[in-house]
Each structure stands twice: as structure tokens, then as C-alpha cells.
Image (cartoon, grey):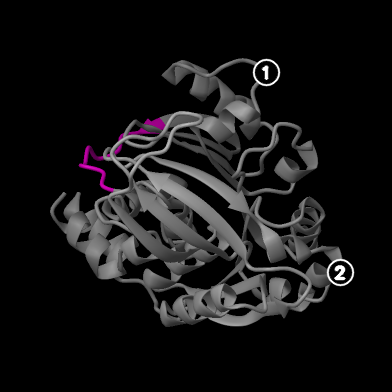
Amino acid sequence: MRSYFYRKFFRQDMASPQIIVVGSIITDLISYTDVFPKPGESKRGSNFKFNCGGKGANQAVSAAKLGSNVKMIACIGDDIFGKENVIKIKESGVNVDGVLICKENRTGVASIMIDKNGENITVVNLGANLLMNVDKIRQIEDEIRKSSLVMLQNGISREGILECMRIAQRNNVQVLYNGAPGIRDLDQEYLQLTDYFVVNENEAECLSPVPLTSDNDFIMCAMKLIKIVKKAVIITRGSKSTIVAIKDGNIECCQIMNDKVKAIDTNGAGDCFCGAFAHAIITNKFTIKDGVFFASKAAALSVQKTGTQTSYPTIDEVNQILQII
């Protein structure tokens, strides 16, 4: 096992194909508390942190820290939150030339609470992120055409997401779509234009007419979605197994077991997974299952630290884990 993953993950050409991330940049205002307050109740916090985040930015940083060539396309406000985010994203190795400063709105903000078990509750105000509309997306068609993969989430306008997918389709560029936050009335065209569709349990349930409670429920959900999605449906489930449905001539569905680790902070773990999976998949050196395995290891490392982007592992840290398997 060790030699197999050494060959596939450790000896990558660092002049990797480009990933374009079109998504959100958000400032995380994080309060830590032992127990979440009930409605109408106040709880004393044990700590507070100010972090740079947003699903788009997080995923860009995750892929870049692993060695991918990543460019971020986003809108921020003309404020200190936006400027601080851009500085931190750039420090992580992401090209920020595509980040636009928009005076019409403020940089997005997320209010996050994290309990003693590392679980989180989040309320997001998207702010300037919603200014990434169809017109702005059309201005970056050349950037998309030159890339190998476009990574998207539900952090910008729906029309902007769909236009980005259509441009990618016209130019034979792969699309990784993280359907987060979940959308219940998601049009099938989004899935039809997606190569890799990644959701967690709650987001998968948004697309199901019935509650999903068992492994078999999630397998059946993935099997239904893969009939629409081009290549793969991935349902991440924290410490439980990840459900993977793959379309490669025939349709295959499997479960990939995840490491049991002591989670300190799960915030942003799904974004870490997406960035790591994108990093793995664009090399074209290994299978979708291998990419999920690799991404699961990266996400498991991230939840063992506090913070969001700051918790994401480097390629050396992931390699160290893979070498002891």
C-alpha cells in the first residue's frame, strides 16, 4: 500500500494544470463555547477568533497548500475584511489577480459558533459575493478556457454559477461543483454540467424527496444523482464512510472508510476535502477513488487543528500520513 500511494501522490509534477476557483470570500467571526445556546439563551464563550474564510477561498487555499496552481475569482467589498482575506489567500500561494474590489457591498461575513466537540453552527451573510454575476463571469471566459478544472460552490449568484458551468462545458473544462450550502430546488442543469458533484449529508438530503438516515439511503441517493452528473457523486459524512458513485461506462458505487480522529474544529473540513480532491484529480495519474482517499486524509488532518484555512495541511503533512499506512 505504501509504495502504491508513494508513486501516485508523492511524485507529482509541480508545474500542475491550473484550477480556477469561482466562489466566495468571507470573514469568519468564530466564538468557542462548551454548549450551543438554546433560542433566547446567552452562553459565555471560551475563546474568539477572526479568520479568513468563505467556501471558495477555503477550497482555493486547500488546493494551493498541496501544491496546485490555483487562481481565485471573487468579489470583495472595499473594506478591511476584504483586504485581509486577499493578503492571507495570497500568502497561501493562490493567485488573487481575479479578485475584484466592489464598492456596492461589504465583504461577506460568517458568524460561527463551535462547541467542545468541535461541531459548528454557522450563519453567513454573502455580501459582495453575490455581485459575481453573469456579466462578470463572461469577462473571465478566457481564464476558464485555459484551466483544467473549475471549482464552484453556492456562494455566488445562481446565475453566475450556471454561466460558469456553461462556459466550462463549451471549452471542455472539467467542473467540480460543491453543492454547499444545500439548495432544495436545484435545477437539473447544474448537475448535467457537473463532472464531480460533492455534498455532505445535509446537502444530499436537500436533493432527496425523503429523509436519508442509513448507509443504504445515501447510496441510493448517490446512485440517483450519478445518472445526471457526468463522472462522480461524492457524499462526505464526517467520520463515517464517504459514499462515492462513479460513471465510467458502467455505474459503480462504493464506500470509502474514513479515519477515526479526535476532532477539535470541523469548520471548513468539507472545503479542505474539495480542494484536496481537486488537487488529486487534475493530475490524471490516479482514479477517482484514489482522489477521495487522498482528500479524506487531508480533511482528517484539518479537523485536528483549530481555525479554517490555517488548519489545512501541506502536501508534506499528507504525505507523512500516507507513508505510514
Q: Which residue position holds label 2?
A: 135
Disc 1 and disc 2 in contact, CB within 8 angstroms: no
Foreground residue, 33 or 251? 33
Query: In this picture, is 203 found above or below 10?
Result: above
Q: Which residue position holds label 1?
A: 209
Locate residue 262: give its quadrant: top left
Percent x, y of residue 23: 63, 62
Q: Which residue appears farthest toward the left when viewing the image?
A: 324
**Callout 2 amino acid:** Asp
Q: Residue at x 24, y 51 (%)?
A: 304
Percent x, y of residue 321: 19, 56
Foreground residue, 270 or 170? 270
Q: Secondary structure at mark 1?
A: loop
How dense is the environment of label 2, judged by Cα within 10 Å: few (below 14), some, or many (20 and up)? few
- Distance from the alpha carbon under mark 1 to that under mark 2: 34 Å
Foreground residue, 116 or 75? 116
Percent x, y of residue 98: 66, 79
From the viewer's perspective, is 228 left or right of 216?
right
**Callout 1 amino acid:** Pro
From the viewer's perspective, is 44 left or right of 16?
left
Magenta extent:
255-264
Query: In this picture, is 175 found above or below 128?
Result: above
From the viewer's perspective, is 43 left or right of 301?
right
Q: Residue at x 63, y 29 (%)?
A: 206
Q: Which residue appears farthest toward the right when viewing the image?
A: 135
Percent x, y of residue 278: 49, 59
From the viewer's perspective, is 83 left or right of 170?
left
Q: Is residue 199 magenta?
A: no
Q: Residue at x 30, y 68 (%)?
A: 315
Q: Of label 1 and label 2, which has the lower sequence position?
A: 2
Most common secondary structure along the magenta stretch: loop
Query: In this picture, is 223 found above or below 239?
Result: above
